[in-house]
Each structure stands twice: as C-alpha cells, then as structure tokens.
Image: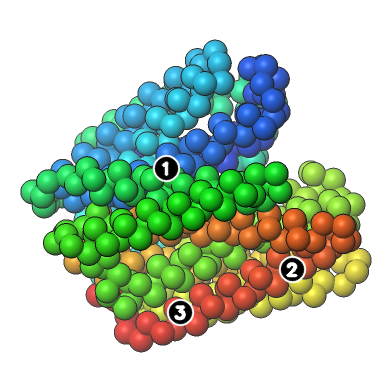
Amino acid sequence: MLALLAIALAISMAILDGAIVNVALPVMAKDLAVSPGAAIFVVNSYQIAVTASLLPLASLGDILGYRRVYLSGLAVFTAASVACALSPSLNLLIAARIAQGLGAAGIMSVNIALVRFIYPHRMIGRGVGNVALVVAVASAAGPTVAAAILSVAAWPWLFLVNLPVGLLALLVGSRTLPATPRSGARFDAPSALLNALTFGLLIIGIDGVGAPEERGLALVEIAGALVVGAAFVWYQLRLPAPLLPVDLLRIPAFALSMATSIASFASQMMAYIALPFYFQDVLRLSETRTGFLLTPWPLAIAAMAPLSGRLADRFPPGILGGIGLGTMALGLTGMALLPPEPSALDIAWRLTLCGLGFGLFQSPNNKVIITSAPRERSGGASGMQSTARLTGQSLGAALVAVLFGLSHGAGPAEPVSLSLWCAVALAAMGALASVLRRKPAG
C-alpha cells in the first residue's frame, strides 16, 4: 500500500545515511583538508543527533500527531541532505549532518506508531515485519550503495541522491499517511534538554571508550550521563505523561521487550564489528571477500522478517523471540567454534543461522513494544523502540573496542573470539528475557 511505501522510502534513507558515509570518510577528509580523526565526527554527529532527539520527537508525535512529525522530519532530512552535499568545509558539513540527524529522528521516532494506524490490529505483526524487512535491506545495502555511487560520482552525491527519493516520499506520504489523534499535552522542554544531555554524553562517551588516549575523558562523560540520567528519571517519575516513558516501563512485557532489544542489537553489532577483523587479520581474506562472506546474515534477516511478522499475528511473540535469539546464539556459537581453516560454506551456514534467528526475533519483539503500550502512547513506544536499537548498537561497538584494547599484544584471533562469546551471552540473555513474556501482546 502507498502509505507503507512512504514509510519505506523515508526509513531506507535514514538507515542508509547512518552507514554509507563510513565508506567515503577517507576521501571526505582529503577533499576537506582535515585529519581522518576529525572526519569521523561526520558520522558521530549524525548518530548523536538521532539518539538525543528520538524521544522528544516521539513526544511531539503524541502531542501534534504522528503524521505531522513524520512528514516534518522527512522534509528536514531531505533539505539537510542537500546542505550536506553543498558544504564547503568540515564545520558546515557537521552542522548539516546534525540537521539531517534531527530529520532522521523525526522519521524513526514515529514510524512504528504510524504502522499501528495503517494496519488493522489483527495485521500489526505483518506491518511491523514489513518495516523490519526495509530496515534489514537498507542496513545490508549501505556499503554496496556507497561503493556504487562513489565508483561513478564524488562523495556529495551520497547525499544528493536523497533529494528525488525524499521528494517522492513527501508526495506519497502527504497524500496517504493517516491523521492520528493528538494528546493535547504541552511539550516538556526541561525533559527534552535532560534527555539530550543524557544520551548525548552517553553516546560520546561510548564512542571514546575504544581509544586508550581518550578513555579517561570518555569515562567522565559516561559518569556525567549517569548522573544527568538519574536526575532525568527522577524528574520523569513526577510527570503524568513523561517524555521518557517510565510509565510504559512499568508494563512487564514492554520492559522485557526493551531489555531484549538492547541485548539483541548489542550482540549483533559485536559480531558485525569483530568478524571483519577475523576474516582479514586471521584468515587473510580481502575486503571484497569479507563483504561477500558477511552477506548471508542480512539476507537471511530480509528473508525471515516478513514471515516472522505473520507468525507474530498467530503465535505468542515472546516465544517466537526466544526461539529467534536462541537460534542466533547457536549460530554465533558456531562462529566462535570455527575450525582453523574454514570453508566459505562453514561460515555461510552459521551466519545464515544468525540472520534467520535475528529475523525471527525482531518483528515479534517490535510488535510487543508497540502493542503493549496504550494506543495514545504509541509515539513514546515507537521512540523507545528506536532508542533501544541505537543504544544496543552503541554498547556493542563499545564492548568490542574495550575487548580489543584489553587484548592488545595477543594474537588477532583472541579479541574476536572474546567478542563472539560475549555476543553469544547477550543473545542468550535476550532469549531468556523474551520467553519471560508469558502472554501475547494485544
């Protein structure tokens, strides 16, 4: 249906722009005459802007309507993409990336909430599965899309391609996305500020943990995030409709689904980061071969996501999620126990198992997150779903960086093995949290 097409186009752009820039960082640094270390903030600024603004924009969705926030975020994202392409300096590019991240947060914060109003209740699992499919394909396609564009054009075209896609999504969305109820509440600016400080300091701190020379400052930033976060939670507990939906976290199914989501995405990210080092430093494979070997995981997610969405409409989501993450843990265990000289088939079937398991888990888990919340709090639930994903990914990346730092001087296989076993533990904990949700949502 056309409403889902509008969501799919916008989500694809937001997900892709979180990944495709990585490939172009070296040439960006050269063209803008800056160091590689400084250029990395082109990536980090986007991530920080998205994470820090997800919950405030989800709250605005409850207040103003999800359609309005979604289309406004899409318009900002599209305009900021053009600004990124035209930026003549690093500072202007970073400013445009922050604006682009704010637009992406507008898209991500309410997309699942909109699905609740597009699909009838009996088909919500199918709708969530379709969105999960889009996210999986966009995540998998990031490096390939970037390489294809850079093979025929300069790096600004990584951003300019968003212009026609964004305009098409705006046209379709403005005609098809449903109007949703408005809460009539007032926007809580102090909560938004505390939220931005908490998640901003946390993400900056996590990003710095992996660098030994920055670790002291990073730990201070993380400690600051915990202090501000404690004040943030205390303030939210006093509010009838908090920006940080602590009221939703009192719902056992919602809280367990959030914990499961964070654990699963942290596990996935640990494997995604560690495995390229194993393929290239241990097996001595090329970058191209590494990319090829990693492909079965996202392809399996894309194949499983629509099916798992339909299963979530018929069977208890908690059980499906537990089976999915248990399967993912088995695949990761297989990767950790690979023989010294594995064949491509040895690797492919294990990574396929990981992808099938994660794909089976994701749609049912997202369905529980959105349907265990009251209908009028769908924006807060949707924002928390995206926040859990980004938090889990950031924690997974930080854990890999710490393990590689602690294993300095050891052989290249040791930190990879430690990372994979930690990923197994996280997937197993997520599976346990999932099956504790005894009743199907809704």
Sequence-first tag of 1 and 3 = 1
> What's the residue type where badge 2 is placed?
Leu
Q: In which image quadrant can residue 40 be found?
A: top right
Mark 2 or mark 3, whichever is nearer to me: 2
Q: Residue furthest left?
A: 184
Q: Secondary structure at mark 1?
A: helix
Residue 50's mark?
A: 1
Which mark sits nearer the N-terminus, 1 or 2? Answer: 1
From the image, tell me which residue sits under label 3: 433
Residue 38 in the image, given as x and y percentages of width and height: 63, 29
Q: Residue furthest top?
A: 88
Tell me: 40 left or right of 200: right
Q: Residues within 10 Å of mark 3 (few under 14, many from 20)?
A: many
Rendered position, 384 above or below 167: below
- Give percent across and percent down for residue 419: 70, 65
- What is the quadrant of residue 259 in the picture? bottom left
Q: Name the kind of residue labelled 3 in the image.
A: Ala
Q: Which residue is mark 2?
A: 418
Would you say the residues marked 1 and 2 are in contact, meaning their CB atoms lie under 8 Å apart? no
| Residue in view at x 66 percent, y 66 percent | 352
Asked if residue 170 can be seen in this view, the reply is: yes
Looking at the rendering, in which quadrant would you find the C terminus? bottom left
**Mark closer to the chain start, 2 or 3:** 2
**Type of the residue with mark 1:** Val
